[in-house]
Amino acid sequence: MAIVRQTSQVGPVVATDLALLVFAAPGHLVVAFEPGMSIADTFMVSGGDHALWGVALYLVSAAALVALIVLIIRAARGAAARTVKTG
């Protein structure tokens, strides 16, 4: 995105990357649900995700959500401060 727009602003690029990480956990849940249910129905076991990388994905996604919220709040405060200085 930064290369196409040829901007030096890092904020939008970081926000886009964080949003992708935030949506990784729900995407994983949607994609893994049907195979997990198939295994559970076939072998009469729990079809839940017990892999460590699944937990890591959820933790990274949660951390990205917190970072994205902080980034949005900082951007809003900066925009408000610029508005007060110019207004």
Image: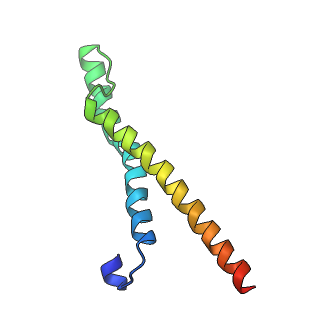
Q: Residue at x 45, y 70 (%)?
A: 11
Kindly identify the residue that appears in the image at 67 percent across and 74 percent down: 81
Q: In the figure, residue 6 lies in which quadrant?
A: bottom left
- Front position in the image: 75 or 81: 81
Q: Is 45 left or right of 18, judged from the image as shown?
A: left
Quick one: 55 or 36, which is closer to the camera?
55
Query: Quick check: 26 above or below 50?
Result: below
Looking at the image, residue 3 lies above or below residue 39: below
**Rendering coords of residue 42 (x, y %):** 25, 19
Q: Residue furthest right?
A: 87
- Which residue occupies the extreme front position in the image? 85
Q: How is the image coloured?
A: rainbow
Quadrant for the C terminus in the image: bottom right
Q: Is residue 18 above or below residue 2?
A: above
Residue 2 at x, y = what percent? 35, 78
Q: Residue at position x 39%, y 39% from top? A: 59
In the image, 77 versus 45, the foreground residue is 77
> Which picture quadrant has residue 79?
bottom right
The extreme top residue here reads 44
Indicate the quadrant containing the N terminus: top left, top right, bottom left or bottom right.
Answer: bottom left
Residue at image position (26%, 29%) is: 51
Q: Position of residue 72 (x, y in %)?
A: 56, 62
Judge whether 14 appears above or below 39 on screen: below
Horizontal side of residue 81 vs 42, given as left or right: right
- Which quadrant of the view contains residue 63? top left
Q: Position of residue 24 (x, y in %)?
A: 36, 48
